[in-house]
Image (cartoon, rainbow, N blue to C red):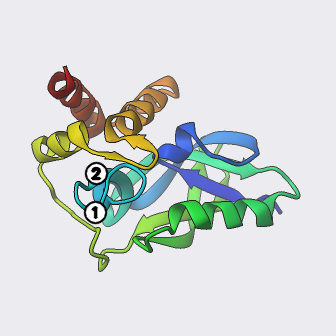
Amino acid sequence: MTMWVFGYGSLLWNPGFEVAEQVVAILPNYARSFCMRSIHHRGTVENPGLVLALDERSDAMCAGVALAVTAGKENETLAYLRERELVSAAYVEKMLDVTLSDGRVVKAVTYVIDESHEQYCCDMPLEEQAQVIASAVGGRGPNTEYLYNTSNHLREIELHDPDLEWLTNRVRELAA
């Protein structure tokens, strides 16, 4: 049985594991948003950045990609993802149904925000998000790079995210 991983942020452009197949997919009841303070990868404890997370909302859906893990690499991939995504326990690993663009419904390893975690920051105004992203830098580089790479990849696969598009334009203005 194929192991699938749902990508909606950095997994879109930097999965970090062998991908056998990539398919545009929809995850119901979750919204992609910059609702997680990043104190490791894209910010520090002193100057947190923001990274995308999936915020559970019954009226939402998130378009992203389902990544099929290369056969035989499942355990290695899961260990890698857990080390990468669960570094601060702000994400919760779930197996959720995603609908692929060809109509198949598959279970995918998905990392969603733990709303009780101290790094969770819901409903931050977009302007405030832009100010944070424009200045934060963490162990994996500038927060701007994370935003730009995610936004560019969504555009390449023809997925429209108005908030990310607004943030990208605003952060470019602030960084200029």
Location of residue 67 in the rendering, given as x and y in whole percent from the top left corner: 66, 48
Question: Which residue in the protein does label 1 denote?
Answer: 45
| Residue 7 appears in the picture as rendered | yes
- Give left or right: position of 33 versus 11: left
103 or 86, nearer to the observer: 86
Quadrant of the rendering where the C terminus is positioned = top left
Location of residue 112 in the rendering, given as x and y in whole percent from the top left corner: 44, 66
Residue at horizontal 33 percent and vertical 37 percent from the top = 161
Image-quadrant location for residue 21: top right
Q: Residues within 10 Å of mark 1 (few under 14, many from 20)?
A: few
- Give left or right: position of 158 versus 38: right
132 or 141, nearer to the observer: 141
| Residue 109 appears in the picture as rendered | no
85 or 122, nearer to the observer: 85
Residue at horizontal 62 percent and vertical 61 percent from the top = 81
Location of residue 166 in the rendering, given as x and y in whole percent from the top left corner: 22, 31
Question: Which residue in the protein does label 2 denote?
Answer: 49
Disc 2 marks a residue whose amino acid type is: Gly
Disc 1 marks a residue whose amino acid type is: Val
Residue that protrudes farthest toward the right in the picture: 72
